[in-house]
Image (cartoon, helix red, strand yellow):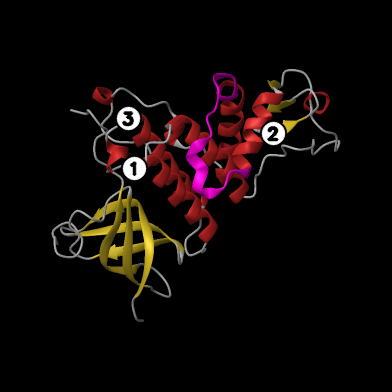
Amino acid sequence: MRSEETEAYLLRSTPYGEADLIAVLFTRRWGRVSVLAKGARKSRRRFGGVLDYFHLMRAEVRPAPAGLGRLLGVELLRALPRLRESVEAYWAGTHVLEVARLGTREGDADEAFFSLLDGVLDALGRGAEPRSLTRVFQVRALSALGYGLPLQVCPSCGGGYPGGAAAAGGALRCPPCAGPGAARIGPGTLATLRAAQQLPSRRLGSLRFSERAEGEGGPLLEAGLTAALGRRPRSLASPAPPSESATAPGLPDAPRPPGGD
């Protein structure tokens, strides 16, 4: 089978044998793919310094009908050094990559999800506020995964949310349908979540979540994402101080966070 080129991000890499790596890539052309990178742990000519997290690459891949394809070479298209200068940006970046790894299937092309991931990482690299951008990503990732929040009308009764909504277990309903004990989602938070859904791709980093929107919307988004993925991403944990953390959650062999020992 002949090789083909595609834009790609590294989602995970695992040592294989003495010199090789098994790399999980998220590509614009094929979605998530696993490939064998022969000699990647030693070859500086084909892979050195480029096959790394937070690098947008042009990857030359030889697909396989079954099993592992081959990664023949990579070319750096864009590096994001700012993600390694801030603990918060680093954790936000690892969260985006972990959700892409957990939420996609091998070989299922999803150019819209790739564009979302690329846009969010690019915004982080340009200095967007990490916490708010993470929430924008989560809102849009839920829609991409088929679990979009019903932000206009209650899915149980079809009514609107004139006085706000309520949330329980990642589900959004009007307060009467949600029942007692559901967490309140105020009108301001609903407006912020709607804005996150509707932002143009080029302005993903422009929306700021207020303290109230973070407090009300954050648990809703995290519970919804956990339900959509079938497990809670490790990267939802708050960033630990650098001295207490060896690697970023979701990236088992990633470099140490900024300021690490």
Q: Earlier in the sequence, mark 2 or mark 1?
A: 2
What amino acid does circle 1 point to?
A: Leu
Q: Quadrant of the C terminus?
A: top left
Would you say the residues marked 1 and 3 are in contact, meaning their CB atoms lie under 8 Å apart? no
Q: Which mark is residue 171?
A: 2
Q: Which residue is mark 1?
A: 251
> Which mark is nearer the camera, 3 or 2?
3
Percent coordinates x, y for residue 87 in the rendering: 32, 30
Other residues around mark 1 within 10 Å, as few (<14) / some (14–19) / many (≥20): some
What amino acid does circle 2 point to?
A: Ala
Q: Is-magenta flag for residue 205?
A: yes
Would you say the residues marked 3 and 2 are in contact, meaning their CB atoms lie under 8 Å apart? no
Q: Eyeballing the image, is 209 above or below 72?
A: above
Q: Eyeballing the image, is 232 above or below 99?
A: above
Q: Earlier in the sequence, mark 3 or mark 2?
A: 3
What amino acid does circle 3 point to?
A: Val
- At numbered mark 3, what does the secondary structure look like: helix, strand or loop? helix
Q: Which residues are magenta?
A: 198-214
Other residues around mark 2 within 10 Å, as few (<14) / some (14–19) / many (≥20): some
Q: Residue at x 24, y 23 (%)?
A: 243
Q: Residue at x 19, y 53 (%)?
A: 49
Q: Quadrant of the N terminus?
A: bottom left
Percent coordinates x, y for residue 140 in the rendering: 58, 44
Q: Is-magenta flag for residue 169?
A: no
Q: How many labels, in total?
A: 3
Q: Is 43 positioned to the left or the right of 251 in the image?
A: left
Q: Which residue is mark 3?
A: 87
